[in-house]
Image (spheres, grey):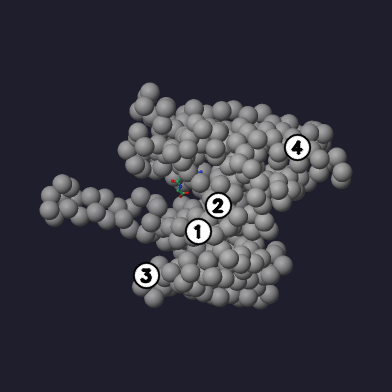
Amino acid sequence: MTQTIKLAVIPGDGIGKEVVPEGLKVLERALEGTGVTVRPTTFDLGAERWHRTGQTLTDEDLEAIKTHDAILLGAVGDPSVPSGVLERGLLLRLRFALDHYVNLRPSVYYPGVPTPLADPGDIDFVVVREGTEGLYCGNGGVVRQGTAHEIATEVSVNTAYGVERLVRYAFAKAQARAAKHLTLVHKHNVLVHAGDLWRRTVEAVGTEYPEVAVDYCHVDAATIYMVTDPGRFDVIVTDNLFGDILTDEAGAVTGGIGLSASGNINPERAFPSMFEPVHGSAPDIAGQGKADPTATISAVALMLDHLELHEAAAKVEAGVTADMATRRGGAQRSTSQIGDAIAEAVTAGADTS
Ligand code: GGG
C-alpha cells in the first residue's frame, strides 16, 4: 500500500517541544516497510507566537490545519501568557472548530511501573469524555469586575444532540470490548438538570446495547474508586470537566501523567482528529530533557488506529509495553533515551513478527 499521511504537527509549549519529536521518531519507525509515509507540517502555535504576534490560532491556521489527515499536538500553556489565553484560544478552539466531541483517554496499568497504589490490580479502562460542551464551552462572563459585587458565571452547556452522540460512541466502544461494561459518571443528585439529561440518554441508548452492562457513579465516588478499586471500570462516559479531572487521576494511579494519551476525535471524519498527551506543558521541567515522551508515543498509536493503520498502531503499543517492562527500578532516562528505547523496541518487535 502506498499512502501519505499529511500530519499537522503542533509542538506548542514547554515540554510539548521535547516530546513531539519522540512521537514522530517512533511513528516513522512503525511505518518502516509499510509503504506509508508521513508528510509533517509544523505549525508555529503557542506562547512564542503569541508574544511575537498576539495571535493564538488564526482562521488561516485553522484552514491550513483542516487540509491534514490528523494532528499531533504536544502541550499548550505557559506562565508568561495570561491563564486561559492559549488553553482557550488554541487548544479548545481547535477542539471546538474541528468538532472533536469525543475525547478518548485510555488507562492501562503495566505491571512493574511505579504507582502510588499498594495493589493496582488489573487496570484497563477508557474514559470517553465529552469534548465540545459542558463547563468548557465558554458560556459565561463577568459583571461588576473589580468591585466587591463582582459576579463571574461559567454555565455548563449540555445539549441532547451533543450528549447523545457521545453516549452512542461510548456504547459502541463498550460493545467492542471484552468486559462490555459502561459507567456513567456525573453528579445527578446535585446537577439535576444536566445530570438528568445524561442519565436519560444513557438509559435510552442502552436499550440498543443489551449486552452492555450499565452502572452509574457520582463523580466524587468515582475519584475514590479510581484509587481504591480502579479495576471496576471498563468504559467511563462523562462530561468535559469530570473527564478532564478523572483522567489526570487515572494517569497518576497508572504510573504518572507522562504515560497517558488522549485522542480528540471527530468520529465522522469531517475534520482531522487530534492526538496529544494528557499532560500539559510542565514549565517546571521544560528544556531539561526530563519529560517522559511515552504519552505522546501512545497518542501516536491512537492516531494510527484512527487512521486505520492498525498493524502500525499495534507495533507502537508493543514498543511501549516492552519499554514498560524495563521500568521497575530502572535508571532515570532522558526524553530522547526513552524515545530511542521505544523506537528500538518497535523495530525489534517488527523484526521478530
Ligand atoms: N497536551 C494537552 C495539554 O496541553 N493540556 C493542557 C490543558 O489545559 N488541558 C485541558 C484539557 O485537556 O481540557
- Residue 314 is situated, as x and y percent measured from the top left of the image, at 75, 48
Q: Give the residue at mark 3.
A: 191
Nearer-the-camera pick, 26 or 166: 26
Tell me if the residue at label 4 has its CB under 8 Å from ligand 1: no
Q: Residue at x 39, y 76 (%)?
A: 189
Nearer-the-camera pick, 194 or 343: 343
Mark 2 vs mark 3: which is more N-terminal? 3
Asked if disc 1 and disc 3 are in contact, CB closer than 8 Å, the reply is no
Q: Is 35 left, or right, of 54 in this rendering?
A: right
Label drawn at residue 249: 1
Q: Give the residue at mark 2.
A: 256
Mark 1 vs mark 3: which is more N-terminal? 3
Q: Is residue 293 visible?
A: yes
Q: Residue at x 54, y 37 (%)?
A: 290
Asked if disc 1 and disc 4 are in contact, CB closer than 8 Å, the reply is no
Mark 2 vs mark 4: which is more N-terminal? 2
Q: Residue furthest left?
A: 148
Q: Residues within 10 Å of mark 3 (few under 14, many from 20)?
A: few
Looking at the rendered image, the quarter that the N terminus falls into is top right
Mark 1 vs mark 2: which is more N-terminal? 1
Mark 1 vs mark 4: which is more N-terminal? 1
Q: Is 223 left, or right, of 123 in this rendering?
A: left
Residue at mark 1 to residue at mark 4: CA–CA distance: 30 Å
Q: Is residue 157 above or below residue 51?
A: below
Quarter of the view holding residue 87: top left
Q: Give the residue at mark 4.
A: 344
Residue at mark 1 to residue at mark 2: CA–CA distance: 9 Å
Q: Amino acid at mark 2?
A: Gly
